[in-house]
């Protein structure tokens, strides 16, 4: 009678040992990142330059500002499932957040992230797939002249499941989406959607320029940002993307990566160009902070949100990095958008303040503890600065 008990005990020891080895392996490969260096300069603008556009009860994710000054934003899915009525996408009207395009469409949205206003005056919103596989990533565009739905598309299975950001070509035909992947388990990539043929191409999947490096993102107090009780450092691949104003290049960067990259837009859109040929055209621009959102000004400078150091930076086409503004109120600079009269808008999603071990939205009590959350703006008006 003792032998079965010994077998069970022996099997339990083996299983425990295997699990322990697996946990050590995961920790050593995905949870042992190093602190990143601080890059940039002394800020060109002082704290007085930063203006609060909106003070919110829940964390905003992205922001998009039209040429006429209309301001749109959404709530970040890592922070909440929306407000008490389930609203997640808004327009600021006289300083008050109103569901956009209306209350009824909020039941269509689920976990919206990337937002962009294109040259056809359409607001694009990307709604990533559910982790549980219950739905696919969706894309919506609204005509801001009529506030009606102008385009919608659902990506095929396993395409764009972790889409975070979108850009649209000047003619409005092609949409480029950045898919961060899932830590080191699912590779990041870029996707190109032809809105006329509805063909989707996956490009640069797993390429060095879209993947993560082992940097550990730090909070303002210096502690690391991780999930699964410290087992895995928070890592995200390609996220911010932006098209240069001349339409020649797409610049992009992974959150956990030290380099901003760019690729010729014409090559990216060419369906006949194979992956090795496209990869050969990718070039580094310069050293960047650990970043989230990107945006371009009319001179081709790329504006970068720094998720660690409470700053917004700018990189010239030659790779020169300058810090524009720093403020301790900024906990995780996230989405960024240019507005009229040379204003720069950005959200503070404050992800590192409330991120849960399972990356689910935290309780309302935790969110209230870290509230309020903000959309900021500043005017880039120092003489001699490109873009001003």
Image: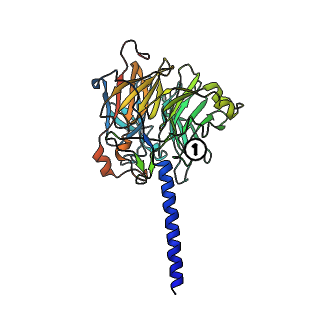
Image: 81 above or below 340: below
User: Residue 229, percent across and down?
Assistant: 40, 54
The answer to which image quadrant residue 64 occupies is top left
Q: Residue 55 location, x and y as percent?
A: 30, 36
Which residue is farthest top? 384
The x and y percentages for residue 112 are: 47, 42
Looking at the image, residue 52 lies above or below residue 319: below
Instruction: Find numbered disc 1 in the image and state the secondary structure of the residue it sits on.
Output: loop
Residue neighbourhood size for the residue with mark 1, other residues' Cα within 10 Å, grouped as few (<14), some (14–19), many (≥20): some
Left or right: 67, with 132 as reference point: left
**Which colour scheme appears in the figure?**
rainbow
Residue at 50% across, 81% down: 5
Q: Name the residue under label 1.
A: 187
Q: Nearer the viewer, residue 195 or 373?
A: 373
Q: Quadrant of the C terminus?
A: top left
The single residue placed furthest to the bottom in the displayed view is 1
Residue at position x 47%, y 38% in the image: 256
Q: Tell me what residue is drawn at x 40 percent, y 19 percent.
A: 342
Can you give x and y, in whole percent of width and height, for residue 366 in the image?
Answer: 31, 50
Identity of the residue drawn at 30% across and 27% down: 51
Left or right of residue 323: residue 369: left
Quarter of the rendering containing residue 228: bottom left
């Amino acid at each position: 009678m003792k032998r079965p008990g010994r077998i069970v005990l022996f099997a339990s020891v083996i299983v425990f040992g295997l699990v322990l080895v697996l946990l050590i392996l995961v920790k050593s490969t995905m949870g042992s990142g190093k602190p990143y260096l601080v890059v940039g300069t002394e800020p060109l603008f002082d704290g007085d330059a930063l203006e609060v556009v909106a003070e919110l009860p829940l964390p905003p994710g992205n922001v998009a500002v039209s040429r006429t000054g209309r301001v749109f934003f959404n709530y970040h899915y890592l922070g909440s499932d929306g407000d008490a009525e389930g609203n997640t996408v808004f327009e600021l009207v006289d300083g008050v957040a109103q569901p956009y395009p209306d209350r009824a469409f909020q039941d269509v949205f689920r976990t919206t992230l990337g937002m962009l206003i294109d040259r056809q005056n359409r607001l694009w919103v990307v709604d990533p797939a559910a982790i549980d596989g219950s739905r696919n990533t969706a894309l919506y565009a609204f005509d801001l002249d009529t506030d009606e739905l102008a385009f919608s598309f659902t990506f095929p299975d396993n395409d764009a499941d972790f889409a975070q950001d979108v850009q649209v070509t000047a003619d409005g035909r092609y949409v480029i989406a950045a898919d961060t992947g899932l830590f080191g388990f699912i590779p990041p990539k870029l996707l190109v959607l032809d809105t006329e043929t509805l063909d989707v191409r996956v490009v640069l999947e797993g390429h060095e320029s879209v993947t993560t490096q082992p940097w550990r993102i730090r909070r303002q107090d210096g502690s690391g940002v991780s999930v699964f009780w410290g087992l895995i450092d928070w890592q995200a691949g390609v996220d911010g993307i932006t098209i240069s104003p001349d339409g020649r290049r797409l610049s992009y960067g992974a959150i956990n990566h030290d380099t901003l990259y760019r690729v010729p837009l014409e090559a990216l859109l060419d369906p006949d160009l194979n992956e090795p040929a496209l990869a050969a055209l990718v070039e580094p621009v310069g050293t960047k902070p650990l970043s989230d959102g990107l945006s371009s000004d009319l001179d081709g400078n790329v504006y970068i949100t720094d998720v660690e150091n409470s700053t917004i930076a700018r990189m010239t086409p030659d790779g020169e990095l300058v810090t524009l503004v720093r403020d301790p109120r900024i906990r995780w600079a996230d989405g960024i958008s240019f507005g009229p009269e040379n204003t720069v808008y950005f959200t503070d999603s404050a992800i590192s303040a409330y991120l849960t071990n399972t990356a689910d939205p935290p309780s309302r009590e935790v969110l209230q503890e870290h509230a309020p959350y903000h959309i900021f703006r500043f005017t880039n008006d120092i003489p001699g600065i490109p873009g001003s």
